[in-house]
Image (spheres, rainbow, N blue to C red):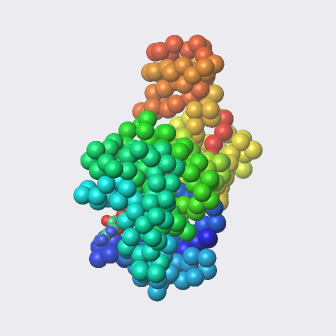
């Protein structure tokens, strides 16, 4: 199935949660919604699930407008962070629930339910837990049950809202890989909400970055890192430190630093023009030389390179150098070599 979100807005009394959001998700795609708290991620999922309604815009599943389709008839599965399993039901009954509440006529028989549920539990690698209650299994297992329950109805679209948020880092890592494989093997189309950048970049075909109710950029992880659309995206993805700078015909000058970054080493974002700009520099964008105003405060060895933390101009700047070249306390000069530039 394919999903089209077209100019969707949603306002709550005090908050404009979504502003003219548009996004296309192709069949079989895994798209992550990534953004700070309050940027509208959950609101968008709730609209798709049919738990809430847009003030304007349209949601289309395979070209069909979802507005008149009630939540239960949308064929959308969802999994939320808080598992929301029924505590008084066994794992088996939790997974079977979505099938049992189907209208008569669409409801499978007991044997079909049993086969479907047991098949899913096997697939989730929790085939032996069917008789237990949610309180008797681990957090990671509960999350697998929640996923099995969402998948039991054979959804056309799977929505996941911070599904691993409550789990520890190790379990989270392994569930990530597992979920992505499951998505591919089952031919799912998935929309995944997270505020964990690493998670989004590791799992998704495309990542839609949200800010204050808007999608500011939706791209592959590689494209986001190489061509962030604006300073917010670059900042959010941690693509270096920010410096006020001036872009001129001869190149880029950073305020408070010597040297000019030649024009061919300056990556210009859309809309960046000569004049005052905001420059982003990562550790690899500096040359470090002995003798200068900066003081080397800390060194982290990374293979053949040292990552230096240099205090200069009242702030800490990270720069790379060959391993072992400098020692803590050294007085150093930082020379900018390359930068990514955004309009102010
Ligand atoms: P988080 O990462 O913290 O879950 P989010 O990106 O999912 O955040 P939303 O939950 O979609 O953000 O919220 C977007 C904005 O809408 C926020 O300002 C929030 O306070 C507001 N909001 C969400 N739901 C409601 C509601 N039912 N009533 C009033 N305001 C709401």
Q: Residue furthest bottom?
A: 68
**In front: 19, or 8?**
8
Question: How far from the left and from the top, in percent, is residue 258?
Answer: 60, 33
Instruction: From this view, report whether residue 203 is shown above or below residue 97.
Output: above
**In front: 166, or 258?**
166
Residue 234 visible in image = no
Q: Residue furthest right?
A: 264
Instruction: From this view, report whether residue 65 is shown above or below residue 217.
Output: below
> Within the image, what quadrant is residue 324 found in?
top right
Left or right, 158 with reference to 149: right
Question: How far from the left and from the top, in percent, is residue 322?
Answer: 63, 19
Residue 282 visible in image = yes
Question: How far from the left and from the top, in percent, is residue 83?
Answer: 34, 55
Q: How many marks?
A: 0
Instruction: From this view, report whether residue 311 is shown above or below residue 131.
Output: above
> Within the image, what quadrant is residue 264 found in?
top right
Question: How far from the left and from the top, in percent, is residue 282?
Answer: 58, 37
Left or right, 29 with reference to 108: right
Kindly identify the residue that appears in the image at 62 percent across and 71 percent down: 2
Kindly identify the residue that appears in the image at 58 percent across and 62 percent down: 189
Left or right, 280 with reference to 264: left
For ligand 1, the image quadrant comes to bottom left
Q: Residue furthest left?
A: 88
**In front: 135, or 302?**
135
Kindly identify the residue that appears in the image at 66 percent across and 35 percent down: 337
Q: Quadrant of the N terminus?
A: bottom right
């Amino acid at each position: 199935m394919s999903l089209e979100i077209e100019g969707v807005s949603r306002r709550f009394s005090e908050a404009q949660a979504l502003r003219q959001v548009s996004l296309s998700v192709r069949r079989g795609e895994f798209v992550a919604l990534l953004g700070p708290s309050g940027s509208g991620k959950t609101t968008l999922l709730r609209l798709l699930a049919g738990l809430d309604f847009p003030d304007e815009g349209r949601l289309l599943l395979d070209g069909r407008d979802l507005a008149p389709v009630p939540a239960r008839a949308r064929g959308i599965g969802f999994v939320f962070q808080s598992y929301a399993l029924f505590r008084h039901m066994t794992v088996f009954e939790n997974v079977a629930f979505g099938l049992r509440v189907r209208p008569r006529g669409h409801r499978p028989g007991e044997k079909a339910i049993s086969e479907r549920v047991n098949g899913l539990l096997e697939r989730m690698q929790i085939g032996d837990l069917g008789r237990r209650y949610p309180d008797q299994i681990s957090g990671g297992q509960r999350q697998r049950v929640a996923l099995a329950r969402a998948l039991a109805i054979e959804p056309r679209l799977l929505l996941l809202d911070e599904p691993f948020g409550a789990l520890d880092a190790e379990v989270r890592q392994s569930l990530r890989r597992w979920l992505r494989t499951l998505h591919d093997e089952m031919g799912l189309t998935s929309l995944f909400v997270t505020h964990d950048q690493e998670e989004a970049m590791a799992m998704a075909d495309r990542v839609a970055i949200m800010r204050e109710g808007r999608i500011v950029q939706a791209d592959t992880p590689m494209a986001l890192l190489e061509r962030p659309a604006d300073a917010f995206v670059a900042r959010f993805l941690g693509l270096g430190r920010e410096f006020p700078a001036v872009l001129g015909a001869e190149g880029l000058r950073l305020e408070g630093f010597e040297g000019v970054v030649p024009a061919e080493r300056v990556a210009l974002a859309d809309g960046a023009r000569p004049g005052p700009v905001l420059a982003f520099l990562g550790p690899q964008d500096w040359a470090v030389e002995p003798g200068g105003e900066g003081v080397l405060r800390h060194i982290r060895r990374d293979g053949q390179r040292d990552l230096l933390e240099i205090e200069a101009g009242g702030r800490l700047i990270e720069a790379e150098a060959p391993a072992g070249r400098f020692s803590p306390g050294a007085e150093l000069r930082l020379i900018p070599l390359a930068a990514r530039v955004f309009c102010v």
